[in-house]
């Protein structure tokens, strides 16, 4: 789980857009860039090289 205070200050390093936490996949999702950043052991990995591309369905949903 990501602390709500931390989530409120984190932004996508690519677009500077806000992030949404996906607890099921343990990722921070940025709809603007279409990237999902992993959260490992409770620590967000905010590197573009570590992010995965969202699928078309994920971008719409």
Image (tube, rainbow, N blue to C red):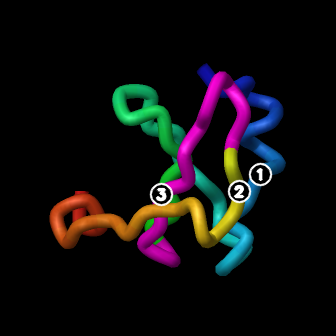
Report how far apart the C-alphas of labels 3 and 1 lie in the structure.
13 Å
Q: Quadrant of residue 48?
A: bottom right
| Residue 36: assigned label | 3
**Residue name at image x 60 percent, y 70 percent:** 49
Question: Picture coordinates of residue 14 (x, y %)?
Answer: 67, 78
Q: Nearest the camera: 12 or 49?
A: 49
> Which residue in the structure is indicated by mark 2?
46
Tag 2: Cα neighbours inside 10 Å, few (<14), some, or many (≥20)? Answer: some
- Comes first in the chain, label 3 or label 2: 3
Say above or below: 25 vs 50: above
Disc 3, SS: strand
- Comes first in the chain, label 2 or label 1: 1
**Residue name at image x 24 percent, y 57 percent:** 61
Q: Are marks 3 and 1 in contact (CB under 8 Å)?
A: no
Tag 3: Cα neighbours inside 10 Å, few (<14), some, or many (≥20)? Answer: many
Q: Quadrant of residue 38?
A: top right
Tag 1: Cα neighbours inside 10 Å, few (<14), some, or many (≥20)? Answer: some
Q: Nearer the viewer, mark 2 or mark 1?
A: 2
| Residue extending farthest front | 49
Report how far apart the C-alphas of labels 2 and 1 lie in the structure.
9 Å
- Comes first in the chain, label 3 or label 1: 1
Q: Is residue 44 left or right of residue 10?
A: left
Q: Is residue 43 magenta?
A: yes
Q: Are marks 2 and 1 in contact (CB under 8 Å)?
A: yes
Question: Picture coordinates of residue 23 (x, y %)?
Answer: 44, 28
Q: Is residue 56 magenta?
A: no
Q: Is residue 48 left or right of residue 16?
A: left
Which contiguous range is marked in magenta?
A: 32-44
Q: Nearest the camera: 42 or 60?
A: 42
> Which residue in the structure is indicated by mark 1?
10
């Amino acid at each position: 789980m990501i602390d709500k205070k931390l989530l409120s200050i984190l932004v996508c390093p690519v677009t500077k857009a806000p992030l949404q936490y996906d607890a099921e996949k343990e990722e921070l999702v940025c709809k603007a860039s279409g990237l999902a950043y992993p959260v490992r052991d409770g620590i967000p990995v905010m590197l573009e090289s570590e992010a995965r591309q969202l699928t078309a369905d994920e971008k719409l949903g």
